[in-house]
């Protein structure tokens, strides 16, 4: 089955840049979406179609996808960005949606 | 404003059934594919099932295939998940999620409900 691997945790200082990776076989051939989930809340989409930002999502969130790795970048990280982040992609071989393993972002 | 409100969760014994509902508002429901996603408390997200705008295309994760049935009633702006032969490992928060396309494939989930907790235990 298709797997998307993320680092379990990322730590960043306020105002610095956090990069969260999502790795999967030929992931660059797929469209990747990213979700933010704060404790006790539902997931919120922060990036879709690799690099598109939904309305209402701050400009500090950006995305890229190439080769086997998609990356979510938070530039100028704020304390409110502390959350779990998940990538999502469609696996055409199984016709399933696959989520990444999730990354806990801590703003120290 | 898009709103998705799940209901029907609760405590159920292994082997029994439960039906989840999702009431949708704030958008033209029959224009979009819809999905169920679950999350074991403290764990990651897992796509469970999805269907196209007209129920013509339906898919299930291997973990629930043959036990769960997804359906929708476009006249009632509602999505359902019939869960049979429940197991302890089905214990999770179940989220209703809206697609951005009429189909269920090659899409993403742009809005989510607040989730409903299903606990399978004797």
Image (cartoon, coloured by chain):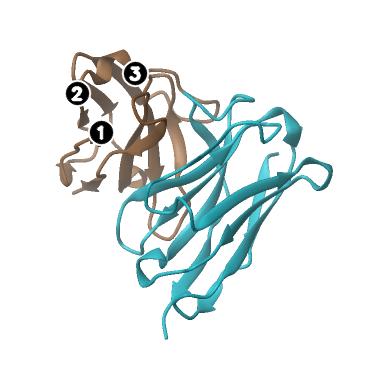
Considering every residue shown, the one lying at the far bottom of the view is B122
Residue placed most toward the observer, B68 or A3: B68
Residues at marks 1 and 2, CA–CA distance in whole angstroms:
8 Å
Residue at 72% across, 28% down: B31
Q: Position of residue B71 (x, y in %)?
A: 66, 47
Residues at marks 2 and 3, CA–CA distance in whole angstroms:
10 Å
Residue at 38% across, 19% down: A31
Indicate the secondary structure of the residue bearing disc 3.
loop
Which residue is under mark 2? Answer: A25
Please report contact status of discs 1 and 2: CB closer than 8 Å, yes or no: yes
The numbered mark, 2 or 3, whose residue comes first in the sequence reads: 2
Label 2 crowd (10 A; few <14 / some 14-19 / many >=20) = few
Residue at 19% across, 37% down: A5
The reply to whether residue B94 is visible in this rendering is yes
Name chain A's colour. brown
Chain identity of mark 1: A
Please report contact status of discs 2 and 3: CB closer than 8 Å, yes or no: no
Residue placed most toward the observer, B15 or A92: B15
Which residue is under mark 3? Answer: A30
């Amino acid at each position: 089955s298709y797997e998307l691997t993320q680092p379990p945790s990322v730590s960043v200082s306020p105002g610095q840049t956090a990069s969260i990776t999502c790795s999967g076989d030929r992931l660059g051939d797929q469209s990747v979406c990213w979700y933010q989930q704060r404790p006790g809340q539902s997931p919120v989409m922060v990036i879709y179609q690799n690099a598109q930002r939904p309305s209402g999502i701050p400009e500090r969130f950006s995305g890229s996808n190439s080769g086997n790795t998609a990356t979510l970048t938070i530039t100028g990280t704020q304390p409110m960005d502390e959350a779990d982040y998940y990538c999502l992609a469609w696996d055409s071989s199984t016709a399933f949606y696959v989520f990444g393993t999730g990354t806990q972002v801590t703003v120290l | 404003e898009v709103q998705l409100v799940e209901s029907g969760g609760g405590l159920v014994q292994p082997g029994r059934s439960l039906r989840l509902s999702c009431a949708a508002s704030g958008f033209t429901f029959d224009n979009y594919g819809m999905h169920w996603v679950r999350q074991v408390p403290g764990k990651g997200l897992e796509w469970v099932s999805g269907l196209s705008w007209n129920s013509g295309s339906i898919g299930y994760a291997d973990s629930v295939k043959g036990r769960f049935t997804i359906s929708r009633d476009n006249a009632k702006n509602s999505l359902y998940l019939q869960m049979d032969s429940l197991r302890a490992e089905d214990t999770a928060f179940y989220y209703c999620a809206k697609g951005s396309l009429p189909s269920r494939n090659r899409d993403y989930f742009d809005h989510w409900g607040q989730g409903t907790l299903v606990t399978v235990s004797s």
